[in-house]
Image (tube, rainbow, N blue to C red):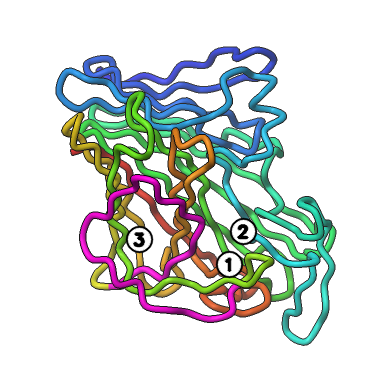
Amino acid sequence: MSFEILKQQYGELTEYVIQETATSNRCVVVPELGGITRQLSLRKGVTLFSLLKTPATPSALVEDTQSASELLFPFASRIPDGQYKFLGKHYQLAKNSGDSAIHGLVRKHKFHLVEQVVAADHAYLKLSYELREAEGYPFSVDFTVKYKLSANGVFTLTYKAKNVGSQPCPTMFGWHPYFQLGNELVDAWKINIPSDTIVVFDNRMSPTGIAPFAIEGSMPLFKKALDNAFIVKNTGESAITQLISENQDVTLRIEQETGEGKFNYLVVYTPPARDCVAIEPLTANVNAFNNGEGLTTLAPGNTVSGTIKINLV
């Protein structure tokens, strides 16, 4: 059998490695640190690309404030002043980024490994976290994430959230990976963003409207700084962002499931170091807890889910 799952120590952290021995394709998951994927390596031809930019040591990973590879639930991005209104009631979240609440309530928390499967053509891990009446979010939701690596070289992230409480609750989900392609800097790459609509922000990075995004096809990232949200074009069951290195003849494909309640938004951010690009599929717009754009109201007993796929071509 060419797939295996290994358990190993990373400093004081315990992590799990899903790998395919024939290709060395692998992903490394840290359940106790928000269930993040610390490493994702996929092969194209003779080259094995390490695709995720994450802090280089266990202590730096624990102390990371840039949300590398974090799972963002029940909200993603920024909620100004940590305040929102839902079904006529006002709520106050803890502020964890200046005067705002940012990136949800499960990051850095310990997830539990609930299932691991090794098959002939794939292997996966399933992790869970029970969110119970947190500050400013007095709801009960069971959150799970499944990481799967397949023999066709595709890495799949699938999340699911179930309202196990007695009241409807607001939910959105996002994933916050920083992608790299070899040792090249961002200026050597192009990006193809599946959108013709960009979100307009105010000075607090909160949406105020939309504007046309007129760039079709591949956009060079040379000397271009991005920190923008987009509404993806819903032309089928999924939308694909492409990060392209022509020098290395490789394209990274980030495919997000689209449709009702799925990943219909996207954030793209180029950090100042210019050594990676954050490409963040979202199920709702920035500050959706207030503007309601894409927000899912999850009734008691109901579930919401979605899938993101990563591969190289």
Total marks shown come to: 3
Question: Is 216 a magenta residue?
Answer: yes
Q: Which residues are magenta?
A: 207-234
Q: Which mark is residue 77?
A: 2
Q: Label 1, on which residue?
A: 286
The percent position of residue 299, horizontal first and vertical second, equals: 62, 75
Sequence-earlier tag: 1 or 2: 2
Identify which amino acid the numbered label 2 is placed on: Ser
**Splitting the image into 4 quarters, where does residue 244 fall?**
top left
Q: Quadrant of the C terminus?
A: top left
Sequence-earlier tag: 3 or 1: 3
Is 232 displayed left or right of 28 in the figure? left
Q: CA distance from mark 1 to mark 2?
A: 6 Å
Identify which amino acid the numbered label 3 is placed on: Glu
The percent position of residue 193, horizontal first and vertical second, equals: 32, 59
Residue extending furthest toward the front: 223
Q: CA distance from mark 3 to mark 1?
A: 18 Å
Does dot 3 land on a helix, a strand or a loop?
Answer: strand
Does dot 2 land on a helix, a strand or a loop?
Answer: loop
Residue 1 against residue 94 in the figure, above or below: above
Residue extending furthest toward the bottom: 88
Neighbour class for label 3 at 10 Å: few (<14), some, many (≥20)? many
Q: Are marks 3 and 2 in contact (CB under 8 Å)?
A: no
Neighbour class for label 2 at 10 Å: few (<14), some, many (≥20)? many
Does dot 1 land on a helix, a strand or a loop?
Answer: loop
Identify which amino acid the numbered label 1 is placed on: Val
Q: CA distance from mark 3 to mark 2?
A: 19 Å
Residue at the (63%, 35%) spot, across then down: 112
Residue at the (41%, 68%) spot, across then down: 264
Which one is nearer the viewer's eye here, 309 or 216?
Answer: 216
Q: Label 3, on which residue?
A: 257
Residue at the (53%, 55%) spot, across then down: 174
